[in-house]
Image (cartoon, rainbow, N blue to C red):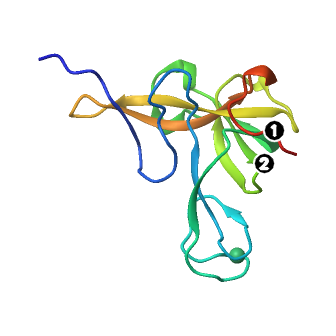
């Protein structure tokens, strides 16, 4: 009774996990019914106009780096050397929110203003055999295969 490994987020409610290979992970955000402002993470009350009852929406999966830095301390105390250092960026999503996230790549791979896209990384396997994943941003692949919006 071999079971297919499943993936689950390290914490529910922040991003989706694709069902198939052609699908991109998305951030789970909110859109205010009254003023249209978008938020990440999700909210019940709009931070702009204080209206209640925001709708859940999918955000990204692409955005542009507002600013970033590189950290030379292991992530989550992981002993794996390939993640011994990592980047952290604030990414402006086309819908409006500025999201902080970890970067997947080397320090030479990033610059302010460049387009990045959401991706998932497996941190480990839980007791049920499910892969525990986090979201990261990595340099965007060619614009032709974008699954999200390129609205500016
Ligand atoms: Zn509002």
- The location of residue 149, given as percent across then percent down, is 75, 40
Q: Secondary structure at mark 2?
A: loop
The residue identified by callout 1 is 150
Instruction: Give neighbour class at mark 2: few <14, some 14-19, many 20+ (Cα, 10 Å).
Output: some
Q: Nearer the viewer, residue 54 or 107?
A: 54
In terms of sequence position, does the residue under pointer 2 or pointer 1 come before the other? 2
The image quadrant in which ligand 1 is located: bottom right
Task: Answer with the quarter of the image where residue 42 lies.
Answer: bottom right
**Please, which residue is most extreme toward the front here?**
33
From the viewer's perspective, is residue 138 above or below residue 81?
Answer: below
Residue 72 shows up from this direction: no
Numbered label attached to residue 94:
2
Q: Is residue 120 left or right of residue 62?
A: left
- The location of residue 70, given as percent across then percent down, is 72, 35
Q: Nearer the viewer, residue 63 or 127?
A: 63
How far apart, in angstroms, are the residues tagged by discs 2 and 1?
7 Å
Q: Nearer the viewer, residue 69 or 58?
A: 58
Numbered label attached to residue 88:
none
From the viewer's perspective, is residue 97 above or below residue 3?
Answer: below
- The location of residue 110, given as percent across then percent down, is 80, 29
Residue 41 shows up from this direction: yes
The residue positioned 59% from the left and 77% from the top of the image is: 45
Look at the image and tell me in which quarter the N terminus lies.
top left
- The location of residue 124, given as percent across then percent down, is 37, 29
The residue positioned 52% from the left and 45% from the top of the image is: 15
Count the numbered circles shown.
2
The residue positioned 74% from the left and 33% from the top of the image is: 116
């Amino acid at each position: 009774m071999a079971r297919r490994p499943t993936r689950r987020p390290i914490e529910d409610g922040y991003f989706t996990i694709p069902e198939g290979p052609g699908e991109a992970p998305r951030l789970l955000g909110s859109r205010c019914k009254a003023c249209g402002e978008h938020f990440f993470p999700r909210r019940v009350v709009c931070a702009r106009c204080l209206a209640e009852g925001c709708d859940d929406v999918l955000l990204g999966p692409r955005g542009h780096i507002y600013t970033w830095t590189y950290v030379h301390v292991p992530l989550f105390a992981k002993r794996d050397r390939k993640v011994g250092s990592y980047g952290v960026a604030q990414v402006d999503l086309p819908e409006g929110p500025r999201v902080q996230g970890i970067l997947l790549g080397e320090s030479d791979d990033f610059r302010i203003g460049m387009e990045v896209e959401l991706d998932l990384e497996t941190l480990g396997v839980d007791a049920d055999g499910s892969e525990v994943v986090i979201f990261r941003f990595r340099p965007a692949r060619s614009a032709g295969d974008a699954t999200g919006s390129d609205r500016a």
